[in-house]
Image (cartoon, grey):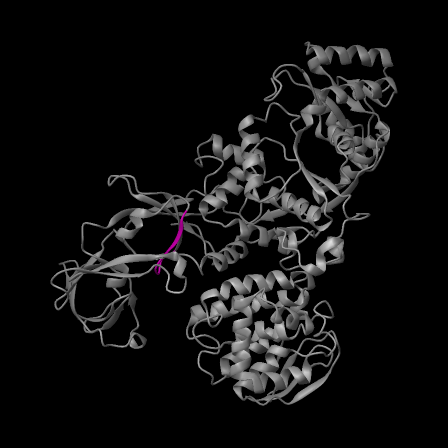
Amino acid sequence: MDIKTFAFAASSPPLPVIAAAKLAGISLPIDSSLSPDSPPTFLFSDGIKLHGSYVLLRYIGRVASLPNFYGQNAFESSQIDEWLEYAPVLSSGPAFENACKYIDEYLEKRTFLVGYSLSIADIAIWAGLAGSGKRWESLRKSKKFPNLVRWFNSIVTEHGSVLNEVTSAHVGKKGLGDPTAGKSKDQSVITNKVKSVNGDVSENNKGGSKPTAEIDLPDAEVGKVRLRFAPEPSGYLHIGHSKAALLNKYFAERYQGQVIVRFDDTNPAKESNEFVENLVKDIDTLGIKYEKITYTSDYFPELMELAEKLICQGKAYVDDTPREQMQKERMDGIESKCRNNSVEENLKLWKEMIAGTERGLQCCVRGKLDMQDPNKSLRDPVYYRCNPMPHHRIGSKYKVYPTYDFACPYVDSIEGITHALRSSEYHDRNAQYYWIQEDMGLRKVLIYEFSRLNMVYTLLSKRKLLWFVQNGKVDGWDDARMPTVQGIVRRGLKIDALIQFIVEQGASKNLNLMEWDKLWTINKKIIDPVCPRHTAVIADRRVLLTLTDGPEKPFVRIIPRHKKYEPAGDKATTYTKRIWIDHADAVSISAGEEVTLMDWGNAIVKEIQKDQDGNITGLSGVLHLEGSVKTTKLKLTWLPETDELVSLTLVEFDYLITKKKLEEGEDFLDALNPCTKKETLAYGDSNMRNLQRGELLQLERKGYFRCDAPFFRPSQPIVLYAIPDGRQQTCLK
């Protein structure tokens, strides 16, 4: 089946496809007459079509005769796919330099992006850089990204005649020279990749220039923006809060403004100093630089005076209607019997509330807004409630506390906030926010909305998360199964990955239900290039392989902990006549088969010993170190039979609930996951005895792990938490 026509829009030629085809010697009859919004297309001789730049690039990679052009195995092909998903970032103006920085760091110890030869991943990134025209050429001449320039130059040196032909024919055409110009359909889905929320603002974006329209603040002036991140101290910071925190950070840096942290501590029943301390810790973990910390409770005296003033002005009243009845009246637009009470009666009941008397406890203060407004948030919202519980910060000084809806408009205005960032779930309360500020006679603060971040299989309600803590379903707010910042960091997430994940979403107002896999894939790209490698064998039914011609006396070699990252250091590997291998590997070996022992060489398994039930009890074989590792099917991890091995507990985690998304009104207790934690005993190489808490490592052929409990004494195993690598997570069995 031959390609009859390669069609694309003349204004946006698919550079990677053209370059890959030329390098592979594949002739493509070109038709550049497609409309600008049409995707590149292959029309085959039998009439079948393929659409999309990276779909076509993958096809070229599969049919090309070039070695490993689409990877030498499924794993490398998947790595290439990751880079093809990442490549469109280079077409997003604000993300360009951040993307260059990421690729530069990745290439520090690499010649190619994937494997040891040129692949379509290299072509895709080369095209993204070459297609940016003068922007890349300027950076190429600088010393800003030395590894990236080295890689780019080596490709041009090796394949310059072909690539120069492609760039001279196509770069500079509309849509390629300008990275913000018309994107292909493949690129349009990634509009805000890796924005500079992490503070790495490119030279072109400093001083308040405009990266994209989507992330502008209305009426913002450079040097005059003042923002606040205002968590309630009723739980730890979770991944949903981190979006709001990082957007505040981004806009403050974007406009050279300030961020303050304000604790919205208006509900003593839920709040504590523990939460305050850990929220500060989490904010620091996210790298958010704030001007100062304030508390809504700092303003309680002024807020009480203001509530009394509004009562005297007839803009608020005291209501003793039972809560359920009040809620029903608000839904039905029915005015409370107390709404037209005299100022004197309202003040009398207000004094009862302040004193916390039995009568006062039956009352609340409500704003007198509009009970017939279609927006139910304007139907006389509650401003103050009685609560006799002591406040975590100021003790029992007060018996009345303002609601968030009443306090926030006041404190925002008084503290000089110019823009209040709020998630779109509060949209209906925006009118209430502005009404209250007007009634108070205060400066108006602009509200800027963004979508709430929701994750699949995840609860982000602090009330529900508290249930898991209080009922012993997790070990605390920092449990690795919790979606808190401390929990996901304890599980092995790098903060850089979280920042990149949040930033890629920008300030979109579209509702997001995000996959965890995407976050963990970003994390893997960060840790894999630097993560030290170690070896472990599962304890259960492990099998001894006896090498009859193996070393009679054990010997030690010093080898790198990471073959491509020298700073990872070295490790000592002991070579012995008898070695342990995993049972799962043992059952896959056939008698007479040649296998590769990683970091040693090949061996031929001669005999397989089994018990009367057919269970493998041992293997024997001979070394064949001159054998080629390319010819063996099995590459085995192994450990020497010595007393120096360390005991390990490998811990895997699963989601706390079994439903991807809970519908409104659905009880989360009906979706609890019965199995969220699995522990497996194993043995690790002796070098692991030096692991520190928080250290990340890779166990060869088993995945990535974070050391949660290091070695203290032989009776206690090292505890390693499994780090997801971006593949689909399933319930543990």
Residue 698 is inside the magenta segment = yes
- Please tell me whether residue 297 is drawn above or below residue 452 in the rendered image: above
Q: Residue at x 53, y 76 (%)?
A: 120
The percent coordinates of residue 638 (x first, y second) are 25, 60
| Quarter of the rendering containing residue 263 | top right
The percent coordinates of residue 112 (x first, y second) are 48, 72
The stretch in magenta equals: 695-703
The percent coordinates of residue 367 (x first, y second) are 81, 25
- Please tell me whether residue 187 is drawn above or below residue 256 in the rendered image: below
Q: Residue at x 57, y 87 (%)?
A: 161
- Left or right: 11 as drawn, with respect to 166: right
Q: Residue at x 69, y 27 (%)?
A: 296
- Left or right: 639 as drawn, with respect to 154: left
* Residue 263 visible in the snapshot: no
Which quadrant holds the N terminus? bottom right
- Please tell me whether residue 593 is drawn above or below residue 296 in the rendered image: below
- In-front residue for pair 333/93: 93
Question: How many numbered dots are placed on residues in this image?
Answer: 0
| Quarter of the rendering containing residue 383 | top right
Q: Residue at x 77, y 35 (%)?
A: 416
- Left or right: 42 as drawn, with respect to 696: right
The percent coordinates of residue 437 (x first, y second) are 82, 32
Residue 603 is inside the magenta segment = no
- Please tell me whether residue 641 is drawn above or below residue 317 in the rendered image: below
* Residue 63 visible in the snapshot: yes
- In-front residue for pair 386/672: 386
- Left or right: 279 as drawn, with respect to 649: right
